[in-house]
Image (tube, rainbow, N blue to C red):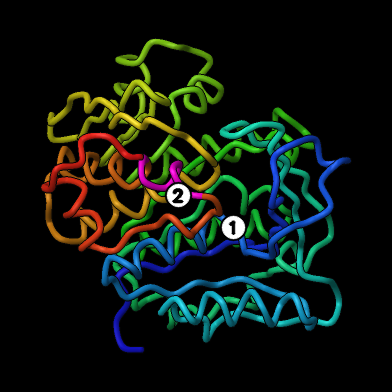
Amino acid sequence: MNGLDVITIGETMVLFDPVFDGPIRYVDTFRKRIGGAESNVAIGLARLNKKVGWISQLGEDALGDYVQAFIRGENVDTSRVVRTNKAQTGVYVKERVREGHTSVYYYRKGSAASLLTMENIDWEYIKQAKIIHITGITPLLSESCWEVSKQLFSFAKQNGIMTSFDPNIRKKLWDNPVIAKERLLYLAEQSDILLSGLNEAVTLLNTDDINEILAYFRHKNVGSVVLKDDANGVHYATDGGEGGFIPSYKVERVVDPVGAGDGFAAGVLAALLDKQPLEEAVRLGAVIGAMVVSTYGDVEGLPDKQTIEQFMYGKHDVIR
């Protein structure tokens, strides 16, 4: 594959998704799916006709075969995925006590992806990308994954590649909260495109003043700062002075909120690759996020361009 719009790096696990709502101890039927923030973004971008590569490490096991085949089947390049017999592919299980309220149980400690090292990265392959995208999950999987994350951003800066970062805070990975915050804040400050939840930015900066948060990251030379304020909308600002607020699209029925932020990220990055202003990029991200929460599964609701146009320009002002 010659030339890539985006390369994402991070862990993807096999997801066991309950067929019925209710406490997990009473649910005995599950669907097998995949779930991983960076691969979700990659698939979302591929459905928007972008050339995307996904890098990770999977176990030499049947679940690893399933993950790689699924992502490759979504037109994402997986040629730089590493396989290892030293650890297994990670697994997680969802619980929906009732529709729209999801809990997640991870079985990823010591997983194959956590063993990813600098030696596993093909740096000539990385040079093909216009944007490198990671989340705050990757640098907290292990010390070697932290080193990979740091060096990716450094390499990107040296080679004129834009970096995109979503803090995607998962406190179950915060063995040491002080170190975790330091690492995520470092990557946020080093990014060109910051796609953060407002509550995540509050956690990292210890302030809930939106203007103060936007000003802080602009001062750190983050080119595009985006703060997702849950169902309220999205605040955004650029180092060029552009800024504003986009209200969220109304969703009548939220069935599964997991993956919405990844869909949002895919929309923003796709629009920026198309040279759209940040306002339009945020608007597209908000539409895709709304569509994702209306569908079960992490990637099943990620739309293609035709589906987005039907929603945005058709008669649909409410997602049903």
274 above or below 166?
below
User: In front: 219, or 39?
Assistant: 39
Residue 36: mark: 1
Q: Is residue 75 above or below residue 221?
A: below
Q: With 122 as the anchor, is 25 left or right in this view? A: right
Q: Would you say 179 lies left or right of 130 here?
A: right
Q: Residue at x 36, y 89 (%)?
A: 1
Question: Which residue in the protein does label 2 denote?
Answer: 262
Residue drawn at x 31%, y 35% is 225
Residue 61 located within the stretch drawn in magenta: no
Q: Mark 2 belongs to which amino acid?
A: Asp
Residue 294, percent across and down? 44, 43
**Splitting the image into 4 quarters, where does residue 48 fall?**
bottom left
Q: How far apart are marks 2 and 1 (CA)?
A: 9 Å
Return the disc, 2 or 1, that comes first in the chain's sequence: 1
From where the camera sits, is residue 100 visible?
A: yes
Residue 208's label in the rendered image is: none
Residue 55, given in percent of the width and then of the height, sits at 55, 72
**Number of numbered discs:** 2
Q: Vertically, is 225 above or below 29?
A: above
Which residues fall within the magenta stretch? 290-295
**Three-letter code, disc 1:** Gly
The quadrant of the picture occupied by the C terminus is top left
Q: In terms of secondary structure, where does tag 1 sit? A: loop
Q: Position of residue 84 (x, y in %)?
A: 77, 81
Q: As rendered, which of 139 and 71 lies closer to the eye?
A: 71
List x then y, in percent, for residue 131. 33, 62
> Which class describes the residues within 10 Å of circle 2: few (<14), some (14-19), or many (20+)?
many
Residue at (51%, 47%) from the top-left corner? 259
Decide which of 248, 250 is in the foreground and name it.
250
Would you call the spot at circle 1 few (<14 residues within 10 Å), some (14-19), or many (20 or more)? some
In the structure shown, which secondary structural element does the residue marked by tag 2 occupy?
helix
